[in-house]
Amino acid sequence: MSLRKLFLLSLFTLHFSLFIESCFSMEQRTVDSLLNELKKFDAHKKEMGTKFTPLMDTIRANVMYQLVVQFWYSKSDTGLIIANELMTLAGNIGYKKGLGNAYNGLGLVYMGKRNYHLAMENYQKAIDIRTAIGDKDGLAWTYNDLGMMGGDKANPVEGIKYHKLALKIREEIGDKGGVIICYGKIGHLNNGLGNYAEALKNYYAALKIAEEINSKEEIAGAYDDIGQIYYFQNNYSEALKYYQKSLKIGEELKVVYILAGNHLNIGNVYFKQKKYDEATSNLLTAIQLYKSYFNVGGMATGYRSLGYINLEKGNYTEALRYCLLAMDWLEKLGAKLGIATVNIEIASVYEKQGKFQEATIYSSKGLEVAKEFEAKDIMKDAYFRLSDINYEMNNYKAAYDYNILYQQMKDSIFNDESASKMKGLEMQYDFDKDAAIQKAEQDKKDVQTQLEIQKQKNIKFRILGGALLLIAFVVGLIFRNRNKQRIKVLEMRQGISRDLHDEIGASLSSVRLMSSFAAESLNGSSPDAKQWMNRIGENTTESMEKIRDIVWTLNSSTDISGNIITRMNQFISHSLEPKDIVCNFISDEEVNDVLSDFVRKRNVYLIFKEAVNNAAKYSEATEVNIKFKVENKKLLLTISDNGKGFDTTIISKGNGLNNMLYRAKQINAILEIKSSKEEGTFISLKMPVTPLRYKLLKKAV
């Protein structure tokens, strides 16, 4: 068997074992944090004395469970002690969720010890308790752990079954993050079975949900998983594409574990493509990243891959160095299956160097550990290596015996896989059969429920129909009264405008004329008398102008399209054109819908008028730009000039600025005035509007 073929055959086994050993092993920082929490808790409990209640012990129970989760594989004996302590504590304080956690923790620990019978017993007790108390999230985790156990004991079909049960619960409770996890785990097991199409479907389902909730880390994980499918199918270009997609997200988020995993995977792809320099560069980067957060499993995998590269290149010294580094980290991790695999790889290096005695020692070490865990894939590789070594040493009898064992193990693995698939099909048939029976019963219940619901709906529709008729009648009365009231208001507005125009306007017009005549008759007389008469005329003219504005805003006939814009244009002609000031006026007919009520129309117009008047009188400008539109659900009025400007901090009360600010506040608008000497003046009015509201107002008028 070639080194490349040996690498491919053992890679999935090592990936799966390291997945368990690194992802679920003790992370020192997490453990230290949990132990500190316990110390703080105990100190607080001692400080409180008799005031401490048993209910508070639930905090300790939850921390203890998290420690079991950290210890279950790498330090299973410690995990077992803590799980039993948790069991006692939860029982004493009557904490049922804690009891469920304790049984689940024991299941994890016994699974780590490969005692699947005891693991199953404790998982079942956890299921019973979590079902009884309605802890659906906990129940889903138990099923996920059972699914992991199926993969661990080389029964991936059983693992898929349990992960699907977890998936169903997570979908029921709307836990989209948990759904992504389930699809990923199901995909991993289908990948291990060689069901690449099914695995790809699972990973794409995870990707779709990750995109829905915009979880970039989960999207990166899905890309990585899809890359693995193409990797195991030897489609390295596609694998590289998805690994690089995942890497890009990792670089964007600056998430170390994503970056490390992708550099590791990209390194392995380059190794398969015989691009050894690129492979080495990526693997060394991955190792440094793993070191930054002390991921022992990741470092070991990186060193192991570097060992393979150098073995392939014939650099046996470097290959041995990297394999021994991998061994060192695996021993610290306590990853026995990984140690067994690397032992066989070291044996390959020694065999290539002609050091057959050392090769035999390491092959035997790997075989011994593999037998302990009944890891048939590793046992098979060990038998093959021992057969090959003995053949090179001319020990043909031993080589033949090991070859027989190799063939037997190979057949056994094939038979196990066939049996597993047959059992899987049987389990799937039973599962589908039970599901069909449950579905039929549920369909029957659904039909009865639908009939009852329809009956209730018919009653509700009758009641609702009567209620709607009553509501329509009441609403009709309300609108009728409102319409009458609106007509009265319009008539009142028109009456007031006529009175202002006909009575007060006429009187002021007479005063203005008489003051003009008086001023002419005083020509040559006292300058003060003539000045006062001129001021009377000016004030009278100003008052008449204000009354015209009031009449315009009151008169309902002005509520037609374009009226306020027309009014503005008239004022521009009256105030700016005589002074040879160019005006660029951009307007939007939609503003009439917004300003169909009296208060808004009047205040906006008077703010506009004050601003334009100031520009005409004081700015010495040659150009004024006005924009009057509805943009982004806001009425926008801007007036700017290229005049001499003014210091807003000094002229704080002049030119009617305070009056403009007051009017803006009345209509819930924001008025900004920006000006500085020799740089002109910019005035902006922004008033929020509701499209539905002003459309209804337009229809009403």
Image (cartoon, helix red, strand yellow):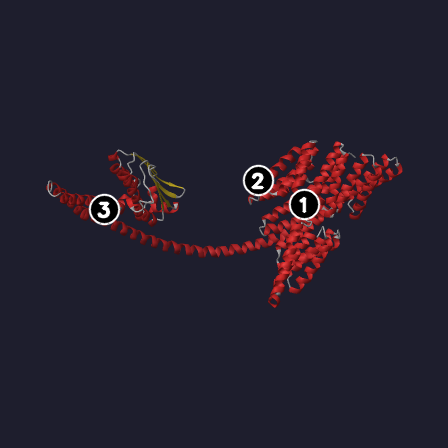
Q: Position of residue 45 (x, y in %)?
A: 62, 63
Q: Position of residue 16 (x, y in %)?
A: 71, 44
Q: Position of residue 321 (x, y in %)?
A: 75, 38
Contact (Cβ within 8 Å) of mark 3 with mark 2: no
Residue 52 seen from this side? no
Badge 2 local density, few (<14 within 10 Å), some, or many (20+)? few
Closest to the camera, between mark 3 and mark 1, is: 1
Under mark 3, the amino acid is: Ile
Q: Residue at x 59, y 39 (%)?
A: 251
Q: CA distance from mark 3 to mark 1?
A: 83 Å
Q: Residue at x 73, y 39 (%)?
A: 304
Q: Is residue 50 positioned above or below 362 on the image?
A: below
For disc 3, the marked residue is 547
Q: CA distance from mark 3 to mark 2?
A: 65 Å
Residue 565 seen from this side? yes
User: If you read the primary sequence from the N terminus, does the residue marked by circle 3 or circle 1 appear first?
Assistant: 1
For disc 2, the marked residue is 252
Residue 462 falls left or right of residue 652: right
Q: In which quadrant of the rendered view does residue 85 lie?
A: bottom right
Residue 376 falls left or right of residue 686: right
Q: CA distance from mark 2 to mark 1?
A: 21 Å
Contact (Cβ within 8 Å) of mark 2 with mark 1: no
Q: Nearer the viewer, residue 672 or 505?
A: 672
SS of the residue under disc 2: helix
Closest to the camera, between mark 3 and mark 2, is: 2
Q: In which quadrant of the rendered view does residue 92 lie?
A: bottom right
Badge 1 local density, few (<14 within 10 Å), some, or many (20+)? many
For disc 1, the marked residue is 295
User: If you read the primary sequence from the N terminus, does the residue marked by circle 2 or circle 1 appear first?
Assistant: 2
Under mark 1, the amino acid is: Asn
Badge 3 local density, few (<14 within 10 Å), some, or many (20+)? some
